[in-house]
Each structure stands twice: as structure tokens, then as C-alpha cells.
Image (cartoon, rainbow, N blue to C red):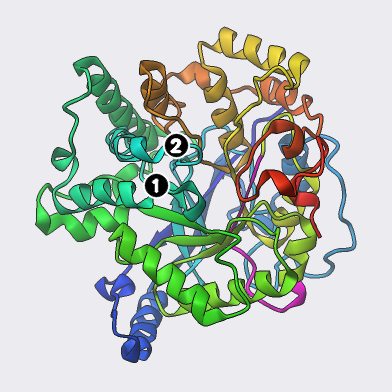
Amino acid sequence: MTRLQLTFVLISTLTTSSTALIENSDHQITRRNALASSAAVAASWVSLSQPKTAAADDTFIDMNAINAVRSRGSSSIAGVVSGSSKSRTGIDRNSIIPIADPPPLLSIRGGIDGKSTIKIPRVGYSFYKTPPEQARRCAALALRSGLRHLDVATDYGSNEEIAKTLKDYLNVGITGLDFSEEKPELLELLDATFKNGEVHAKSSTTSGGAFRLGNLLPAPEGSSGRRGRRDALFISHKLSNMEQSTDPVAVKRTVKATISTLRCSYLDMVTIHSPLTSKASRLESYKALLDLRDFGFIKSVGVCNYGVGPLQEILDANLDIPSVNQIELSPFNQHKDVVEWCNTYGVAVSCSAWSKLSSADGPTEGWDILGKLAQQKGMTKAQVLVRWACQKGYVCVPRSASTSKVERIAIAQNSYGGVNAKPEFLFTPEEMRILDTLDVAYPAGRLGRRDGWKDSDVTGPDWDPTNFI
């Protein structure tokens, strides 16, 4: 099988005014004008493909071949869309493109009216199930390993602790963080992982060396580099079910309070944590987030755990399509219908945690196959999952606590530099095919995950939030 390697590189120049925040609500029009100014300078997409003779315009790309690589036997939602190859948002369809050697950044919709693009680090760090008392340490370890995408949420209860690390990092840099508890060999691993990610980004076969970690690297140490360090971060926050409301003012106040708690001036993305509320609450909350985006408090709007039903609600309400849909995705539950819907409408897909896939109730046979592949490649099982997600064209936010040495090392292992530590970590088309055949539609009810819902929401082992209508 010919390996099709594609990536899209957004060349954009953001003016200083693009993220300027005016905290006085009386100056929202000024904020909007500043954002409009920055949106005007956003440059167009440049597509790079192998071989060099491939057409730059994706209308000449054989998307059937791409989809065949992405997953075999994908369920069809034919008839949902007809006509032009572009959605009404103007974004090309088939945005989820499998990439054998994925670059560190992925372009998604953002900015005023969602008409410009912003970059999201392809691999991040999630604070799901991270004990709040460990969050400050975990954030520091993640930053030192080169991770610049932090996935936080009200339900995780750790924002105040994360804010302490963010404050030290933004004001001073990596040297402002406390690593006094860490052993020298761990710090060496974190530094090597960071460097490896930078080197790999420069030499990535999909980028031809043109795509580098420049936007992710920290600004010069000291307070003068605070703005640069903030711009290099991608902070994604989840609005809890309790915070969803039919009152848009309440939603906006909640998000502004989160920005204040995190002390980060703005949020790069805010998502609705789950669809398990009411249609009215979902849509009104979503509209409020779009308003916050257009006034510069946040840069993009997404959803989590959304199946085709709630996604279609947004489309039917004539609202901007989400920039990202984060769902539980693994070789064992590939949510092909949801992924295909997102692919059709230009929505990036993000993989969240795989909390209990290795438990006694897990897909034993499939897990054994994955484990053997990990052993053959010299990878951990978690690295296999992260690498699979990246090569499918998804964003990935793995998690790890910091109680044990193994957990602390895992933060580095599962980062962009970690999953690109060796050339042999790249999966061949045949290895990807093997992983893709492990799909048993393993649902959240059996997985035991509680990420955006409570025990009382789960009706049985076959329950899954993406089936909620």
C-alpha cells in the first residue's frame, strides 16, 4: 500500500492586538475590532504532500484512498451532506487526514466568527483523574517535557493548583518552576524529550523540514517573555454540565471566572464537557461560548463526548460548527459514525483518556494484540495508543499522575517528543491495519470512565454518551 503522507501548514501572522484583552465589558467593541484586525492578516492554507508532484488543492486528492487508510469498513452517513466539497463554514471536508509522521501542530478554526485558523498542539496533557494535590507538579513536568497543550476542566477540580504552575511559568519560564522533588535522571529525560520533539519537528517527513516547534518553544526567561510564553500555550477548558445554562450571561460569567482562576488572560478553547443535559442548555451554552470567542475571551469553541445527534443539533440551529470534538477513541472503540460526521464537516477529533482499557473487563484479546505490538516496537501500551491516534489524524490528550516514578516518566513518554523518540515508533500501514481491526465498540459504560457524567447517568455496560440524543 502506498503511504499517503499529508499535512496542512497554516502560515499566519498574528498582530499584537489579536489576543489583547480588555477586562472592562464596556470595551467589548474595541476587543472585537482588534480581533478583526488580526483575522485580516491570517494567511491561507498551504498543503504539503508526498510525492512532490501531488496537487496542493485537496480537490485533486483521492479522498476514498485516504478514508480507506484511516479505517476499513467505516460506516456511511451518505445523504447527510450533498453538493459542494466545502461545508457552509468554508472549511474543506475530510479534515481528519491520516499522517504517518504527524507534525506537532494541527490547524483548526478559531478567531472572530470562526473564520481564521489557530494551531493546536497535536499531543497534549489531560488532568482527568489527576488528584488536585498532584496537579501543580504534573503541570510542571508536562511543560518541561515540551507539552504546551493543557486539557483542564471544572469537573477535574484542579484549576487552582494548575494556576500556580502557570503563574510561575508565565512570569519566569521553566526556570521558575519547582523541580526540587525530582531526581536528576527524570529531569534529563524530560529535557531530552523536549529536545527530541523539537528536532523531530524540524525533520518531519510530512513537513519537509518546514514545520518546526518554533511556536511551542518558550520565550526568553524572565517577565519580558510572558506574552510569548502565553501565546505558545494552548489551554483548553471544559464547561461542566452544572455550568451549562439557558442563561447566556451565567455561562459567560463562569468562563470569565475560570480565566481569572487560571490567570491566563484568555482561553484557547472552551468545550462543553458532555451532551448529558437538555437541548436548550446545550445550544444556549454553545451560543454563549461563540459570543465569548467573537469578543476575544476565548479563541475557539468545541464539544466533548458528542455523538451525531447533538452535533446535528448545532448544524440544524445554523450555528458555527465546533472546532474540535473530543471523545473516547481507541482501537477498541473507534466511533466511526461520529468520526465520519466530523470528517464531513471539518471538525477536528481529539482523543481523551483510556482509563480502564487494561482492566479485567477490558477487551482482553485485542489488548493482548496491542501489547505484543508494543513489545515488538519497544513502546509502552500508552505510547501505542497515542501514536495510533496521531497517525489517524486526531489530536490526543493522554494523562498520567505523579505518585510513582513510572507515572512521572509516562508524562514524557506520551508527549510529542516521546512518541517520536525512535524512527521505529512509526507504524507501518500494515501495523495500523492490525490496530484498526481491534474495534469492538467498547462503550464508556463498560470502560468505567466518568468524564463529564456521574454514576447515576450510566444505565448499564453498553451505555455511551455518544448515543445520547
Residue 26 percent coordinates (x, y): 33, 91
**Mark 1 residue crowding within 10 angstroms, few (<14) / some (14–19) / many (20+):** many
* Residue placed most toward the observer, 160 or 169: 160
In what element is the residue under mark 2?
loop
Q: Identify the disc placed on residue 469.
A: none
Would residue 112 be visible to someone looking at this image?
no
213 versus 171 height, above or below? above
* Residue placed most toward the observer, 96 or 272: 272
Q: Which residue is mark 2?
A: 130
**Three-letter code, disc 1:** Ser
**Mark 2 residue crowding within 10 angstroms, few (<14) / some (14–19) / many (20+):** some
Quadrant location, the N terminus: top right
Specify the quadrant of the image occupied by residue 390.
top right
Residue 407 percent coordinates (x, y): 41, 22
What segment carries the magenta color?
315-328
Residue 405 percent coordinates (x, y): 35, 17
Asked if disc 2 and disc 1 are in contact, CB closer than 8 Å, the reply is: yes
Q: Which residue is mark 1?
A: 158
Q: Most extreme residue toward the right, as rendered? A: 79
Position of 115 with respect to 63 (left or right) is left
Quadrant location, the C terminus: bottom right
Q: Write the residue at 33% across / 52% down.
A: 160
**Residue 321 within the magenta-colored segment of the rendering:** yes
Mark-to-mark CA distance, 2 and 1: 8 Å
In what element is the residue under mark 1?
loop
Position of 222 with respect to 459 (left or right) is left
